[in-house]
Amino acid sequence: MNNPGRRKELGLFLRARRDQALRADYGLPPVGRTRERGLRREEVAFLSGVSVTWYTWLEQGRDISPSRQVLEAISRALHLSSTGLGYVLSLGGYATAAPAGPAADTAPPHIQRLLDALDPNPSFALFPDWGVAGWNTAYAALYPNIAKVPAADRNLLWLVFTDPYVRNLLPDWETTSKRFLAEFRAETGQRLGDPDIQYQVERLKEASPEFRQGWDLYDILGFESRERLFHHPAVGVLQLEHHQVSPSDRPDLHIVVYTPAPGSGAAAQMKSLLAAA
């Protein structure tokens, strides 16, 4: 593991998970009278079957090469999810290499044609750094600002945390923004040392106190299709299902599609919204 950025991220992530562990889950008493969260390094090392020195070096981001078995043992000791395990392994160099950054500013023509064919379902494509590569008419009707913001700001995470329109569009903004941040971190962990990713993270830290606070929590989540709510000023609350797929010939791109939630009136609402647009 000779990548300093990954070593640092792995150490900070392990420290954050250790500090947030609930001691009762391990059958351990509180520290003092009130501290119910947080494991000592010695406790994690014992539960993992590794030396305290070795585990300490991991958290410190030292230039060491932990085996896959050691990282798996530490992940089990910290009760990490499958997403957490994958994240730790990727930072340790035991996962497929991260995709290269975007080679262009927009989606390839065949991806744009696919997005257009998905109308009237709001759809857009994302680069690995979550830059918005393309979108269809329905998405522009849902979020009219997408065509107006400068190309440098056309990044999903940036828009979620800095655009007042998006904050008003999402009635559950606080929950959704935290989930997006955790998904972004899980997806980009291997590339946190890349200039594109560093740029987005640093500018968001400066622009958004909520992002800065959430980033320091080191939460990660894998993507799951789920129902989303959007409060559009023209048609009211839309109930949509959020899906994500990657084309086999462009696995570096994610295509996000919002479909009407079963039993909702979202299909009629989108039709009305498109007619007005």
Image: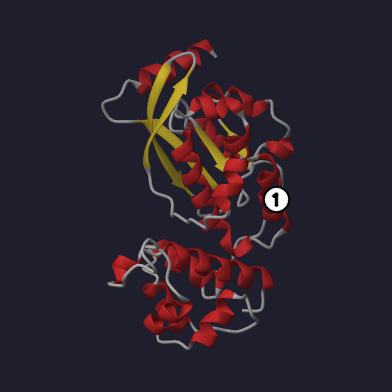
Residue at image mark 1: 202
Q: Nearer the viewer, residue 153 or 267?
A: 153
Q: Nearer the viewer, residue 12 or 124?
A: 12
Q: Quadrant of the N terminus?
A: bottom right
Q: Nearer the viewer, residue 248 or 221?
A: 221
Residue 212 position in % (x across, y down): 61, 48
User: What's the residue at 53%, 31% (across, down)?
Assistant: 116
Regarding residue 110, the answer to whether it shows in the image is no
79 w.r.t. 235: above or below: below
Q: Quadrant of the C terminus?
A: top right
User: What's the residue at 62%, 30% (across, down)?
Assistant: 163
Q: Residue furthest top?
A: 276
Q: Nearer the viewer, residue 52 or 256?
A: 52
Residue 31 position in % (x across, y down): 39, 69
Horizontal arrangement in the rendering, residue 224 relative to residue 27 (left or right): right
- The kind of residue tagged 1 is Glu
Which quarter of the figure has residue 56? bottom right
Q: Secondary structure at mark 1?
A: helix
Residue 120 position in % (x across, y down): 45, 25
